[in-house]
Image (tube, rainbow, N blue to C red):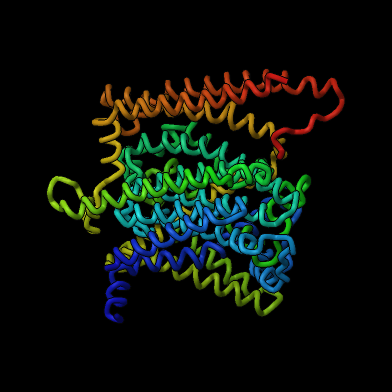
Amino acid sequence: MLQGALAFVQAWWVELLCAVLIVLVVPLIAGYIVLVERKVMADMQARLGPMRVGPHGLLQPIADALKLLIKEDLIPDDADKFIFWFAPVLSMTAALTSMGAVAFGPWFQVARDINIGLLFVVGISALGPFGIVLGGWASNNHYSIIGAIRSTAQLISYETTAGFALVSGFLLAGTLKVSGIVQAQLTDQVWYVFLAPVGFFTYLIASIAETNRAPFDLPEAESELVAGYMTEYSGFRWSLYFLAEYANMIVVGAVGTTLFLGGWLRPFPNVQWMGWVDALPGVLLGAVGVYCVVRAGKQPAQVQALFMWAVAAACFAVALIFALAAPVGNAPLKFMYAGLYGAFWFLLKVSAYIYIFMWLRFTLPRFRFDQLMRLGWHILIPLALVNVVGVGIGLAIQSALGWNHWMGLLAMLPTTLGTIVVGMLLIRWNDKHAAAASAPIATDGTRVEDSYAG
Amino acid sequence: MLDSIVFYFFASIAVISAMLMITRRNAIHSAVFLITTLLSTAGIFLQLRAEFLFIAQIILYVGGIMVLFIFVIMLVRLDVPLPQIRSPLRQRIAVFVAVIVFAEAAYIVWKAHAMQGQGILIPTAAPADKLPPNTEDLARSLFGMYLLPFEIASVLLLVAMIGAVVMAKKRTNTP
């Protein structure tokens, strides 16, 4: 029995390590995304954001997590106890499980040889909204159930768009395997965002809607529904929902990065003279480490100085691996280097993707529900469909002319332009119809009850 | 060994939650147990190394159809038609159909065992170390050998979809 367990660990230790890392690190990363989000929001609103806990508020997520853990956990009397208990767990489980097939680096992946690859990520993360819907229903609260119903309607509408956008990427890659998709972008010498820009754009919008982020945050719209589906949740259950939302942001970012932004590849992986980019991760981490050491002495409290030293040590350790692995050529070091190096670029791209989410959140006002539905069904789904056809035609032209590598861009150009023109026409047509639909409401003076809002 | 443990695990969950699904009084509870049944069926697909069927089951049935089910359950008051559904005649018909389907399935299993190796194909799981690229295989057979049935099925689905839209339109137009 023990021998069997040992053999199992020996055969699967990389996968086990990745799985444990994901479960341990993702909640931490999610906490820090919240901090970054607050900092970005503060920056955009010309204020400082959290500054008290730790240097520049760096310990704020840990303080928040502690606060949430010791908060009282309330369950309403009229709630459906089991589903109320189960729903947030379902959301979190779906988000973490779907990360199992995400490739953070060449070997940094739990389910490595899985044939369905990215479909696994998309399919499992689509289970998350069940947590929202069931939680909203189980709370037995009007605001919660309206949030839940809005969430389902939104999910059904935007899942289709996301699916078609992914299809256009899969067409280009010719495989569903995560490593195969990245490899295809390496051999094609171009990120697929340049070959199918409309596909990336529609996926970006659909993924914002799927993660319930502003301007699509109708399921939890504060000014209308208190907190939507999580109105009745408190303490740790609430934080599970919160973590699931941010973990889902990482998941959709990872899917978009893998399919359209070249996965774990560095920029211009085939260009020889751009080789100096390889040194960037090590130098950057070293610089962060030095900064932390310098600032550690100036911290007002012991804990904060300790925190700075810890961050510096972690940065130096990783930077050391980067520095040593290249010249020494030691096998285990090379192995670690490949994983960490891939993870660096991958996470950098995912961060950029998530930054776009935040940027949009603090820039655009929330949609009305009929606007949301109109955008989804009248503009995005037709556009995504046309884009799939366009990419197919582009690929046919490409193979007919025998163009490959970046020359494929030229073949894709006319079909991309055609798709964009169709998108413009759709928007114009929709504007005309939207104006016609809202006219009687404006003349009447009274607001007609929104038939979509539940 | 491991394979049969996994299979019996998922199979028992599927059967138990299917039974719970038809015995619950609350429609949402039934839906939750139906989701569990569908998920464990997906697990059996995965145990048979049919990855694509596994994810298609999850995306289509769990992620698509069940979301729609729950959406409808939440919007519609279900207490009203319940006595109508639970009429004794319907129950008798349901029992009759269930018995026939069970007999059919049992007959096929029995026949397959009796005629082992005599033309009736007994599907076996592929070895774990040599996974068939089943997404590609499925695509090849769907869009190659079975293209015509596939197209007919998609036309049928399209007709159903358009029909649903037309019916919904009619109801809003007549006051």
* Front position in the image: A132 or B103: B103
The residue at 57%/50% (across/down) is A129
Q: Quadrant of residue A20?
A: bottom left
The residue at 35%/63% (across/down) is B8
* Front position in the image: A226 or B110: B110
- Against A142, residue A1 (above or below) is below
Relative side of B20 to A19, left or right: right
Q: Quadrant of residue A429?
A: top right
Is any part of residue A209 visible from this angle?
A: no
**Where is the C terminus of chain A found, in terms of image quarters?**
top right
- Against A7, residue B112 (above or below) is above
* Front position in the image: B169 or A152: B169
* Front position in the image: A384 or A136: A136
Number of on-image labels: 0
Q: Position of residue A298 (x, y in %)?
A: 67, 73
Q: Quadrant of residue A406?
A: top left
- Against A1, residue A126 (above or below) is above
- Against B19, residue B62 (above or below) is above
Is any part of residue A303 visible from this angle?
A: yes
The residue at 27%/22% (across/down) is A400
Q: Position of residue A376 (x, y in %)?
A: 59, 32
Relative side of A294 to A42, left or right: left
Q: Position of residue A349 (x, y in %)?
A: 49, 49
Residue lying at the far left of the rendered structure: B118
Residue lying at the far bottom of the rendered structure: A2
Q: Position of residue A29 (x, y in %)?
A: 56, 61
